Amino acid sequence: MVRRIPRGRVATYGQIATLAAVPGPTGPRQVGYALAALAAGSKIPWHRVINAQGRVSPRGPQDDGARQLELLALEGVQIGSDGRIDLARYRWRR
């Protein structure tokens, strides 16, 4: 599902969990764990998945989300001064 998110668009962890039929209330968290476990250099566009508040969630204790924000900005996604991405504008609609 994550590979289907077009360049310049984002999806939430919950949205991906629903589309991928990851069951239960922990589905979004499971999606996050799976993306965090990707090998460095993976071709899966993990950076296009954000939280339901329109923010980047750090991938681990050594991550502040800067790389993800940088990758999104390179795709034309605007990040607000408060660190939020406008889901009404950038959310992928499948």
Image (tube, rainbow, N blue to C red):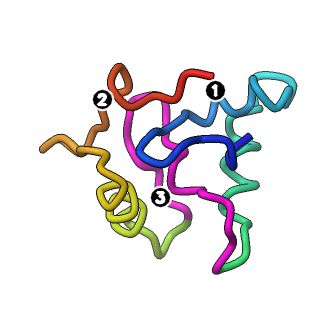
From the image, tell me which residue sits under label 1: 15
Residue drawn at the location 73% of the way across and 66% of the way down? 37
Residue interval drawn in magenta: 41-59
Residue density around tag 3, few if under 14, some if 14–19, many if 20 or more, within 10 Å: some
Q: Are marks 3 and 2 in contact (CB under 8 Å)?
A: no
Q: Would you say residue 48 sits in the magenta stretch? A: yes
The verdict on residue 46 being magenta is: yes
Q: From the top left corner, tell me how far across and down residue 64 is, in percent.
A: 37, 66
* Kind of residue at badge 2: Asp
Residue 72, x across and y down, in percent: 38, 55
Return the mark for residue 35: none
Residue 86 tag number: 2
Find residue 79 and report its image quarter: top left
Quick one: quadrant of the N terminus?
Answer: top right
State the separation of the CA atoms marked 1 and 2: 15 Å
Q: Look at label 1 and name its amino acid.
A: Gln
- Amino acid carrying label 3: it is Pro
Q: Nearer the viewer, mark 3 or mark 1?
A: 1
Q: Is residue 62 above or below residue 91?
A: below
Q: Secondary structure at mark 2?
A: loop
State if disc 1 and disc 3 touch (CB < 8 Å): no
Side of 52 where 42 appears, left or right: right
| Residue at 75%, 23% in the rendered image | 18
Of the image marks 1 and 2, the number of the one nearer the N terminus: 1
Distance between the Cα atoms at labels 3 and 1?
18 Å
Of the residues under marks 3 and 2, which one precedes in the sequence? 3
Q: Position of residue 88 (x, y in %)?
A: 35, 19
In the image, which is nearer the foreground, mark 3 or mark 2?
Answer: 2
Give the residue at mark 3. 58
